[in-house]
Amino acid sequence: MNIRTYGKGELAQLYCPHITTAAARKKLMQWINLYPNLMDALHRAGFSDATRSFTPAQVRLIVEALGEP
Protein backbone atom coordinates (compact mmCIF):
# COMPACT_ATOMS: atom_id res chain seq x y z
CA MET A 1 0.00 0.00 0.00
CA ASN A 2 1.20 3.47 -0.84
CA ILE A 3 1.41 5.47 2.41
CA ARG A 4 0.17 8.96 1.55
CA THR A 5 -2.61 11.35 2.52
CA TYR A 6 -6.03 9.74 2.05
CA GLY A 7 -9.47 11.24 2.41
CA LYS A 8 -11.42 9.50 5.16
CA GLY A 9 -13.88 8.05 2.65
CA GLU A 10 -11.13 7.10 0.24
CA LEU A 11 -9.25 5.06 2.85
CA ALA A 12 -12.48 3.56 4.17
CA GLN A 13 -13.42 2.39 0.67
CA LEU A 14 -10.11 0.57 0.40
CA TYR A 15 -11.02 -1.41 3.52
CA CYS A 16 -14.71 -1.87 2.59
CA PRO A 17 -15.04 -1.61 -1.20
CA HIS A 18 -18.45 -3.28 -1.47
CA ILE A 19 -20.45 -0.81 0.63
CA THR A 20 -21.22 2.88 0.24
CA THR A 21 -18.58 5.44 1.14
CA ALA A 22 -20.60 6.67 4.11
CA ALA A 23 -21.07 3.15 5.47
CA ALA A 24 -17.40 2.33 4.86
CA ARG A 25 -16.30 5.47 6.70
CA LYS A 26 -18.55 4.59 9.65
CA LYS A 27 -17.22 1.00 9.74
CA LEU A 28 -13.57 2.14 9.57
CA MET A 29 -14.13 4.52 12.46
CA GLN A 30 -15.77 1.70 14.45
CA TRP A 31 -12.71 -0.51 13.84
CA ILE A 32 -10.38 2.32 14.83
CA ASN A 33 -12.32 2.86 18.07
CA LEU A 34 -12.27 -0.87 18.87
CA TYR A 35 -8.52 -1.26 18.38
CA PRO A 36 -6.74 -0.61 21.71
CA ASN A 37 -4.92 2.75 21.84
CA LEU A 38 -5.27 3.46 18.10
CA MET A 39 -7.52 6.51 18.52
CA ASP A 40 -5.15 7.93 21.15
CA ALA A 41 -2.21 7.46 18.78
CA LEU A 42 -4.16 9.11 15.95
CA HIS A 43 -5.01 12.09 18.17
CA ARG A 44 -1.33 12.44 19.09
CA ALA A 45 -0.59 12.46 15.33
CA GLY A 46 -3.02 15.36 14.83
CA PHE A 47 -6.29 13.57 14.06
CA SER A 48 -9.60 15.18 14.95
CA ASP A 49 -13.20 14.46 13.99
CA ALA A 50 -13.23 17.70 12.00
CA THR A 51 -10.42 16.69 9.65
CA ARG A 52 -11.43 15.32 6.27
CA SER A 53 -8.31 13.28 5.61
CA PHE A 54 -5.68 11.10 7.23
CA THR A 55 -2.06 12.23 7.03
CA PRO A 56 0.62 9.73 5.98
CA ALA A 57 1.60 9.30 9.65
CA GLN A 58 -2.00 8.55 10.58
CA VAL A 59 -2.42 6.13 7.65
CA ARG A 60 0.72 4.30 8.80
CA LEU A 61 -0.76 3.93 12.31
CA ILE A 62 -4.02 2.59 10.89
CA VAL A 63 -2.30 0.12 8.57
CA GLU A 64 -0.01 -1.08 11.36
CA ALA A 65 -3.04 -1.70 13.59
CA LEU A 66 -5.60 -3.03 11.10
CA GLY A 67 -3.38 -4.44 8.38
CA GLU A 68 -3.31 -3.44 4.74
CA PRO A 69 -6.67 -3.01 3.04
Image: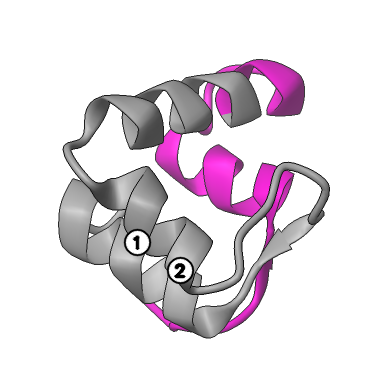
**Residue in view at x 59 percent, y 17 percent:** 19
Q: Is residue 9 magenta?
A: yes
Residue occupying the point 47% across, 32% down: 28
Residue 27 in the figure: left or right of residue 39:
right
- Kind of residue indicated by mark 2: Arg
In this view, 62 is above or below 23: below
What distance separates the C-alpha of mark 1 from that of mark 2? 5 Å
**SS at circle 1:** helix
- List x then y, in percent, for residue 55: 60, 76
* Three-letter residue code for mark 1: Ala
Classify 10 Å Cα crowding around label 2: few (below 14), some (14-19), many (20 and above). Answer: few
In the image, which disc is placed on residue 44? 2
Q: Which residue is mark 1?
A: 41
The reply to whether callout 1 and callout 2 are in contact (CB within 8 Å) is yes
Q: Residues within 10 Å of mark 1 (few under 14, many from 20)?
A: some
Q: Nearer the viewer, residue 25 or 34?
A: 34
> Residue 32: which quarter of the image?
top left
Secondary-structure class at tag 2: helix
Question: Which stretch appears magenta?
Answer: 1-24
Q: Is residue 46 above or below residue 66?
A: below
